[in-house]
Amino acid sequence: MAAGIKGIWNELELGSRIGESAALALFREAELPELAHLATLVRNRRSASDQVTYVIDRNINFTNICDRHCSFCAFHCTPGAAGAYVLPLETLREKCRETRRLGGTGVLLQGGVNPELPWSHYLNLSQTIREEGLWLHGFSPVEIRTMSQLNGLSLGRTLEVLREAGLGSLPGGGAEILVDQVRARIAPLKGSSGDWLEVMEEAHKIGMKTTGTMMFGIGESLEDRVEHLRCLRQQQDRALQRANGGYHTAFAAWPFQSGNTVWAGRIPAATHDDYLRTISVSRIYLDNFEHIQSSWVTMGDKTGQLALHFGCDDMGSLMLEENVVSAAGTHFEFNREEIEHLIRNAGYTPRQRDNIYRSL
């Protein structure tokens, strides 16, 4: 074991919080078995050491029309393009009813930033899902900012009105890497890191729960990844200090899928080693996050299962429907029996939860 890693090991065993330089050292110098041990140490302080949770929900994209033209997205269409759609409300209602029949408890609802949709449409989407008895975990920060521009309300008031209509919690989509130099290169129209963080801050201020995310492996540096984690940890510190019920419930990280994008063949695919290293350093550094999700959707069942020994305490969603990752050519699917089998084979007891980590 390298001397620097030994020092970090000792700090973590004492319960100390590590800084950015230590996180970089773990990325660069720690062996995978060392990261597995340290990430599990932190995991077991934050969540039940014998359990792994999962949620049954449906990832519904209500439109694929988007005017932000992110270079990493294989899903979006421009207005009027072949294949462009806006999901009818009655189809949304049918999907909700099917979700309930299949044992689902919620909907992850996101779309492109569609310039043709009025503010009322977002309220109708929220109301429809609430009427069907499902939790709405919906709308990324860039969508919330667009709604605020449409309705002339502040970000906070926009979130309050959406909550009155049926919004339950806010997903962390669109975070990518919270470093403006990286964002300007991969998605210049999507907004700054400050724009994303501001929406999450306003959600926390009104007591709304959110998730933190990171998409990595699109040419960013390890320093960029650590800066991203620093932004999330500082925001979580502020949220927990308010003690009003608003905070990030969990963190999820996944590697960029380049298929069918302009980056295909230009950026090497993230390795399983890189994924395990990134998720374990995230678990160690984000000591104020209770839950870390495994990304089996992008990494497959074996690495998704192995991540449970690298700090993850949650297998995420069964995803009764998924469109964005599959548009990039990555396809993995589970049913309830399969995901519980993976959890048990990893040595844990499976527990179903809802979208804000309440046990069912």
Image: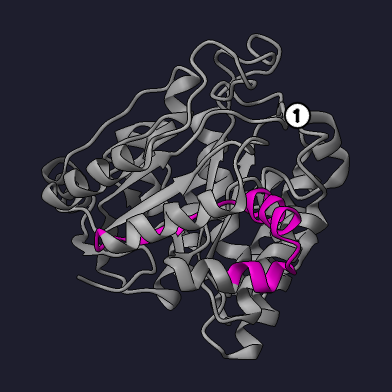
Name the image colouring.
one colour
Query: What residue occupies the far right of the structure in this picture?
Result: 181
The one of 38 and 182 positioned closer to us in this rendering? 182
Residue of label 1: 219
Q: How many marks?
A: 1
Residue 230 in sight here: no
Q: Amino acid at mark 1?
A: Gly
Which residue is nearer to you in this view: 275 or 260? 260
Q: Residue 266, image x and y in percent?
A: 71, 12
For residue 295, above or below residue 119? above
Residue at point 61% right, 40% down? 215
Is 149 in the magenta? yes
Relative side of 303 to 254, left or right: left
Q: Is residue 140 above or below residue 164?
A: above
Q: Residue at x 42, y 32 (%)?
A: 299
The magenta segment is 132-159
Label 1 SS? loop
Expressed as whole percent of the image width and height from the top left, the position of residue 149 reads: 76, 54
| Crowd band around label 1 with a 10 angstrom C-alpha radius: few (<14), some (14–19), many (20+) | some
Residue positioned 66% across, 65% down in the render: 200
Q: Is residue 320 above or below residue 35?
A: above
Can residue 56 be seen here? Answer: yes
- In the image, 309 versus 173, the foreground residue is 173
The residue lying toward the viewer, choosing from 86 and 213, is 86
Is 14 placed above or below 137 here? Answer: below
Of the 4 image quadrants, the one containing the C terminus is bottom left
Task: Give the percent coordinates (x, y) of residue 158.
Answer: 64, 67
Q: How far across and down, in percent of the image, does residue 128 sit?
A: 35, 55
Whether residue 66 appears in magenta in the rendering, the answer is no
